[in-house]
Image (cartoon, rainbow, N blue to C red):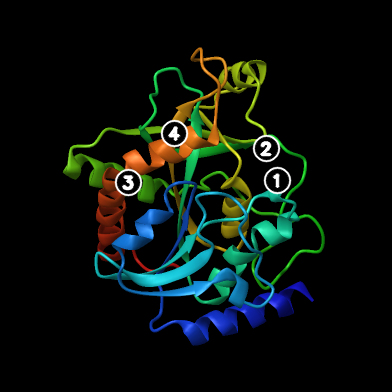
Amino acid sequence: MMMEKMQEAARYVQDQLPGVPKIGMILGSGLGVLADELEQPAAVPYEDIPHFPVSTVQGHAGRLVFGYLSGVPVLMMQGRFHYYEGYAMQEVVFPVRVMRLLGIADLLVTNAAGGVNQGFSPGNLMVITDHIKFFDDNPLRGPNMEAFGPRFFDLSAAYDPKLRSLAQEAADHLGLSLREGVYAFMPGPNFETPAEISMLRTLGADAVGMSTVPEVITAVHSGMRVLGISCITNMAAGILPQPLSHEEVMETGSRVRSVFAALLQQIVGRWAERVPPGR
């Protein structure tokens, strides 16, 4: 039943697109404005797509946008879905499955994250090297969808090392300082406590957020190559003597928009030129 829903959604999206996307992109809180950088954009509202969830979070426009970034056809999710919105994990990752059915084998995920590493500052960009999932649910729980991938699979290199190197090269070209680190997933919707942040730091996390990891698990299961980039929009609880707010997340995302857009353009251009197409 779930596969039928995914296939129906994919057929609908495919009929709306004026081209064939090579790279899928998921834009986090405050970063959806990057869709404005696309040439020849064509948007498909989530509510029009059969069986698609609808984003309820401020800063998530709620549409798929096809267009060309650095001359490369891409399909952007302008707004994602979160477990804390009340969706089941399979609903959270539904769009990733649809992208795979559309033939997309490469995925670039972005998010707004809290800085756990005390050497970070709001506005820093971080390439994700690995993740920690602090949550017992899993998007692949239940019967395995063999059409996408095997029951048991490897996450040792979930965030493709070659793509991470390519991102660093793009940042160097622009003269940007691009951090690297481990992203910790917490379910939200509340921000973490200072004690939880201290625990995460002890365990090796550099940033924390409420998204991305379910999508990445699903993408890797489907044989997709993944590059993840976090925008550090605030320092996590207990680091600075100030309360945390979603408004700060949105403001920082807006402030780094031009830098982030320039980096993604450089990455996508190099990705299409130098990385062989995925399976």
Q: Amino acid at mark 3?
A: Arg
Q: In the image, residue 163 lies at what x, y percent?
A: 37, 51
40 vs 53, left or right, is left
Circle 1 SS class:
helix
Q: Which mark is residue 233?
A: 4
Residue density around tag 4, few if under 14, some if 14–19, many if 20 or more, within 10 Å: many
The residue type indicated by label 4 comes to: Thr
- Specify which label sits upstream in the sequence, 3 or 4: 4
Of mark 3 and mark 2, the one earlier in the sequence is 2
Relative depth, front residue between 121 and 108: 121
Residue 86 point in image, percent of width and height: 75, 51
For marks 1 and 2 on the same chain, the one whose residue lies earlier in the sequence: 1
Q: 225 and 48: which one is in front?
A: 48
In the displayed structure, does residue 249 sit left or right of residue 202?
A: left
Asked if the residues shown at circle 4 and circle 2 are in contact, with their CB atoms under 8 angstroms apart, the answer is no
**Callout 1 amino acid:** Tyr
Q: Residue furthest top?
A: 241
Which secondary structure, mark 4?
Answer: strand
Q: CA distance from mark 3 to mark 4?
A: 12 Å
Residue at 58% across, 69% down = 46
Residue 127 appearing in the image: no
Residue picked out by circle 3: 257
Observer-nearest of 143 and 89? 89
Q: Earlier in the sequence, mark 3 or mark 1?
A: 1
Disc 3/disc 1 C-alpha distance (Å): 26 Å
Where residue 182 appears, x then y in whole percent?
51, 33
Q: In 3D space, how far apart are the residues under numbered discs 1 and 4 (Cα atoms)?
A: 19 Å
Residue under label 1, please give it: 84
Q: Residue at x 25, y 54 (%)?
A: 266
Looking at marks 1 and 4 on the same chain, the residue that comes earlier in the sequence is marked by: 1
